[in-house]
Every structure is written in C-alpha cells, then in structure tokens.
Image (cartoon, rainbow, N blue to C red):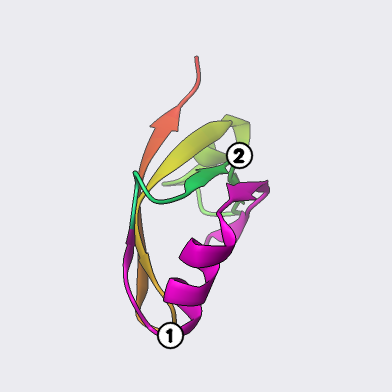
Amino acid sequence: MIFTSYNGVLQCSKDQIDRFSAGEELKAGDCYLITAPTFETKSGKYDWLNAVQAVGKMLSFKRGDHIDYDIFVLK
C-alpha cells in the first residue's frame, strides 16, 4: 500500500471553469495545474518513495472521469 498526498496550484479562467463544470475535458493549455505529490509506504519494495519529492504537470482533466499528468522526481 502506498499513501499519496497532493499539494499544488490550479489557475483557470471563469470560462474554463464553466467548461469543466459542464463536463468538458480541459487540456494543459487551458489551465495551469501543477502538483507536488509525496509518498508514504512501509513496503520494503517501494520504501525508496518515502524519500521522493515529485512534481507533476496536468495533461488533461475531465470532471468525474480522469486527470492525466506527467510526474517527475526531483533530484
């Protein structure tokens, strides 16, 4: 089991928020969404994640369906 916690920033215009609320998919160029996930696990196989700070950038987001983003580990 891996616990993931997310912080980040989301900036969208009113038009983009209205489109999102109506069920449209937003793409990376529509809104600025950056996340900074951290991970916690007791698993020996994945314990390296406990020392990771990652950042992510949204690729697409559809309410009630998915959020797709690229995640990068900072070193």
* Residue nearest the viewer, comparing 42 with 6: 6
Q: Image point 61% across, 39% down: which residue? A: 50
Determine the CA span between mark 1 and mark 2: 38 Å
Which residue is rendered at x = 38% and y = 83% of the image? Answer: 23
- Circle 1 crowding by C-alpha within 10 Å: few under 14, some 14–19, many from 20: few
x then y, percent, for residue 47: 53, 42
> Where 6 sits versus 51, above or below?
below
Image location (x, y in percent) of residue 74:
50, 21
The range drawn in magenta is 1-26
The quadrant holding residue 26 is bottom left
The one of 25 and 52 positioned closer to us in this rendering = 25
Residue corresponding to mark 2: 50
Count numbered badges in the picture: 2
Which residue: 52% across, 54% down? 43
Q: Is residue 39 left or right of residue 30?
A: right
Residue 40 seen by the camera: yes
Residue 1 seen in the current view: no
Give the residue type at disc 1.
Answer: Ala
Q: Is residue 10 magenta?
A: yes
Residue corresponding to mark 1: 22
| Mark 2 element type | helix
35, above or below 21, in the image: above
Closer to the chain start, of discs 1 and 2, is 1
Relative to 35, say whether 22 is above or below.
below
Of residues 48 and 35, the one drawn nearer to the viewer in this rendering: 35
Determine the residue positioned at 51% across, 34% down.
55
